[in-house]
């Protein structure tokens, strides 16, 4: 069912120093996804509207991205 997929359009992506990317989770709102990215990276919410959060010392980076139609994630 694509209905459940469109209900969670925001993704948290972990990117390692080599550029490998892994989807960590999907969320209904950007705020939820950004909050999770900040928690995973160890940052406190500071009101910044950045699309991603650094993982510190270049180790891991957590990005917030919106799922778009045609990204291969829909049936």
Image (tube, grey):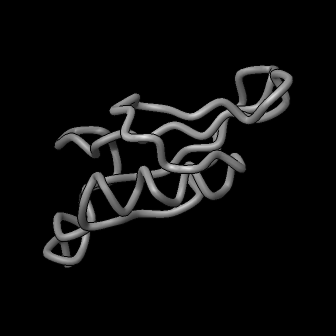
Determine the residue positioned at 55% across, 44% down. 13
Give the camera-side residue of 39 and 7.
39
Q: Is residue 68 or residue 74 the one in the foreground?
A: 68
Residue displayed at 18% across by 70% down: 7
Q: Position of residue 10 (x, y in %)?
A: 32, 53
The number of callouts visible is 0
The image shows residue 11, relative to residue 75, as above or below, that is above
- Direction from residue 8 to residue 16 in the image, left or right: right
> Residue 64 lies in what quarter of the image?
top left
Judge by depth and name the residue closer to the eye, 28 or 54.
Answer: 54
Percent from the top left, x then y, of residue 63?
Answer: 51, 37
56 lies left or right of 35: right
Q: Would residue 15 appear left or right of 36 to someone viewing this image?
A: right
In this view, the residue farthest toward the front is 46
Q: Is residue 9 above or below residue 72?
A: below
Up/down of 18 relative to 36, above or below: above
Residue at 36 percent across and 63 percent down: it is: 32
Query: Where in the figure is residue 19, as x and y percent of width and height?
Result: 71, 22
Rendered view: 64 above or below 56? below
Q: Position of residue 11 (x, y in %)?
A: 41, 52
Quarter holding the C terminus is bottom left
Q: Could you tell me which quadrant the N terminus lies in? A: bottom left
């Amino acid at each position: 069912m694509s209905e459940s997929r469109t209900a969670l359009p925001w993704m948290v992506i972990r990117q390692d120093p080599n550029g490998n990317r892994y989807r960590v989770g999907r969320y209904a709102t950007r705020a939820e996804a950004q909050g999770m990215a900040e928690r995973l990276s160890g940052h406190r919410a500071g009101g910044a509207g950045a699309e991603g959060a650094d993982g510190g010392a270049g180790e891991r980076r957590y990005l917030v991205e919106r799922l778009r139609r045609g990204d291969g994630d829909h049936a």
